Image: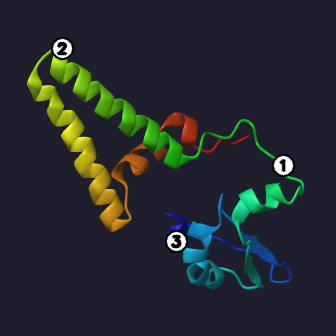
Amino acid sequence: AWEQSHLTVDPDADVVFSCKTGMRTAGACDRLAARVTGEAFVLDGGLDAWRAAGLPVEENLSAPMEINRQVQITAGLMILAGVILGFLVAPVWFGLSAFVGAGLTFAGLTGTCAMARVLMLAPWNRPRFA
């Protein structure tokens, strides 16, 4: 998704890319650097390392929960619901758990997550404009 975004940076500005732990950013650093005209840096250890070093962090408390956590919560609830409904209502509900498990496996193998894409469309994940 971010590859299609219009990432522009002041040519005289240094840019630091980061994620929570630095792993995703490090894996994408070549693609990120290609999107800026100035210098670009990857923050070693990500935001977690920045915080651990006692450096200041400004948080947007109205920002939605990280999409990965939203996927984990949603998938977990769907799997749990499938198991409970499978025991209490009808065994066909076990298929819901199997479907979510297959989706998570596919996401892990391909690096794409349909559930994350759907959750990104949720109202709480959309940008708010003034």
Query: Horizontally, is 74 left or right of 29 in the view?
Result: left
Which residue is at a point 31% across and 65% down the rendered structure image?
A: 109
- Name the element at disc 1: loop
The kind of residue on which mark 1 rests is Glu
The amino acid sitting under disc 2 is: Leu
Instruction: Determine the CA span between mark 2 and mark 3.
Output: 45 Å
Apparent side of residue 6 relative to residue 77 in the rendered image (left or right): right
Residue closer to the observer: 120 or 89: 89
Residue 26 versus residue 94 in the image, above or below:
below
Q: Earlier in the sequence, mark 1 or mark 2?
A: 1
Element type where label 2 sits in the image = helix
Find residue 89 and report its horizontal and vertical position in percent: 15, 15
Q: Marks 3 and 2: in contact by CB < 8 Å?
A: no
Residue 121 seen: no
Amino acid at the residue labelled 3: Glu
Q: In front of the other: label 3 or label 1?
A: 1
Instruction: Between label 2 and label 3, give the one nearer the viewer.
Output: 2
Quarter of the image for residue 79 reads top left
Q: Mark 1 sits on what residue?
A: 58
Q: Residues within 10 Å of mark 2 (few under 14, many from 20)?
A: few
Quarter holding the C terminus?
top right
The residue that label 3 is drawn on is 3
Q: Looking at this view, name the residue that lies furthest to the top.
A: 88
Residue 91, percent from left and from top: 10, 24
At horizontal 43% and vertical 49% (from top left) the residue drawn is 116
Secondary structure beneath dot 3 equals helix
Q: Which residue carries the number 2 mark?
A: 88
Q: Can you give x and y, in whole percent of width and height, for residue 61 in the image? A: 75, 37
